[in-house]
Amino acid sequence: MDDLPLLPIIQSLDLESSGSDCTIYPPVGLGICTLLDWQTLDLVRYKAFHSQVEVEIDCQVRFWDVNKAAKQAITVPDPPKDDPDYYLRNMIIKFVEVTRSNERLAENTGRKLHLISDNAAFDPQIINELISRFSSDLLKAFPDYKAEFANLPENIRPEEKKQRFKRLPWSFLHPNVWGSIKSIDSSDVMFGMVPDFNRNRKVKKNQAASLSNWDWIVKEYDVPKAPENYTHDHIPDHDAYVDAWQYYVMLGIKSGMIKKKRVIESKATSLRARMEGEISLRKIGFKRKFR
C-alpha cells in the first residue's frame, strides 16, 4: 500500500434551500463533511430554517411538505429583529472557516483539496452568491486574507474599496491564487471512475443512476463499512457524509486501494455450472467427458 498515491482531502458540501432562486429564496441548511485517509475530520450541520423564511410554493409542496423530518432538523428561532441576515452571514463564515482549514491542511501535507457536491449547478453556485453578498463580513472575519492584498504587486493590487473576498474556485487563504479549490460534481464523476464500470453493470429501467451505480460498486468491490450509518435523507450533514464517503470509495477503487471481491465457487455451484455446460454442448452435437 505504501506505493499507492495519496488520496485527496475530500470536503463535501450539501445545501438545502427554500426555493429555486437563491437571490429570492435563501438556503436554509448547510452540511459539510471532510474525509482524509478514511477518517472524518469535519461533520457540520448549520441550521437556518425559521418562520420568517419565504418558501417558494413549488418547493414547499413538493419538497418540504414531504421531508418534514429534514425541516425539523434545521429549524432555528427567528433571527434578531435588527439583524435579519444573522443566519446567512454566519452560514457562509462557517463554510469559509472549514474550507480554509482544509486548504491549509492540503498545503501542509501536499494533498489536493476536492470540494464535492451532488449537483455542481446548485450547491457551489449558492456558496458563491453568499460570498458576494457577505464579502465585507468575510474580510472582517478573516483579516489575514484582507492583509494579503497589501503584499500584492502594485500593478495588480485593487484599491481598498474594491477589495472583495473572492469566490470559488479562488483560494480562501490567498486572494491572488486561482484554482486551489477544485469543485467536482460527485454524481457525474461516478461514471467512468471504476474499470469496466459502464460496460458490466446493468441498470433497471427508470432506476436512479446514482443509486444503481453505488449498489453495483458495493456488490462488485470489497468496500469498507462506513463509520457513520447515514442515508441520503435531506438532512444536510447526512447527505454531505454519504456523498463524501461514496466518492472517497470510488477514488479508493481507482487508486487500487479497494479491490474487486474474490468469488469463491462452491463445489455444488461448480458442478451445476459444468453440468449445464455439458447439456448445452450435447444440444449442438458435442460431447465432453468430466474428469
Image (tube, rainbow, N blue to C red):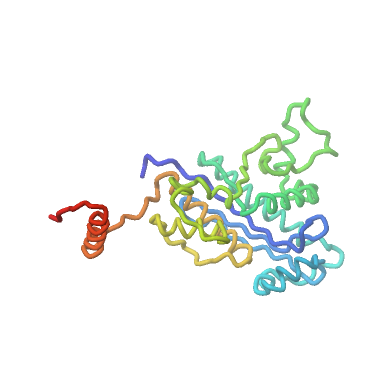
Total residue callouts? 0
Question: Who is closer to the viewer here, 4 or 283?
Answer: 283
Q: Residue at x 21, y 62 (%)?
A: 267
Position of residue 241 in the picture relative to residue 224 (left or right): right
Residue placed farthest to the left in the image? 291
Which percent across, then down, holds residue 12? 59, 54
Say whether residue 135 is left or right of residue 219: right
Q: Position of residue 184 (x, y in %)?
A: 60, 46
Q: Position of residue 209 (x, y in %)?
A: 56, 56
Q: Quarter of the image containing the C terminus?
A: bottom left
Which residue is nearer to you in this view: 121 or 107? 121
Q: In the rendered image, which quarter contains the N terminus? A: top left
Q: Quadrant of residue 172?
A: top right
Q: Residue at x 84, y 62 (%)?
A: 83
Q: Nearer the viewer, residue 263 or 246?
A: 263
Q: Is residue 146 above or below residue 121?
A: above
Q: Relative to 283, is 107 above or below?
A: above
**Residue 213: horizontal and vertical position, in percent?**
50, 56
- The residue located at (67%, 41%) in the rendering is 169
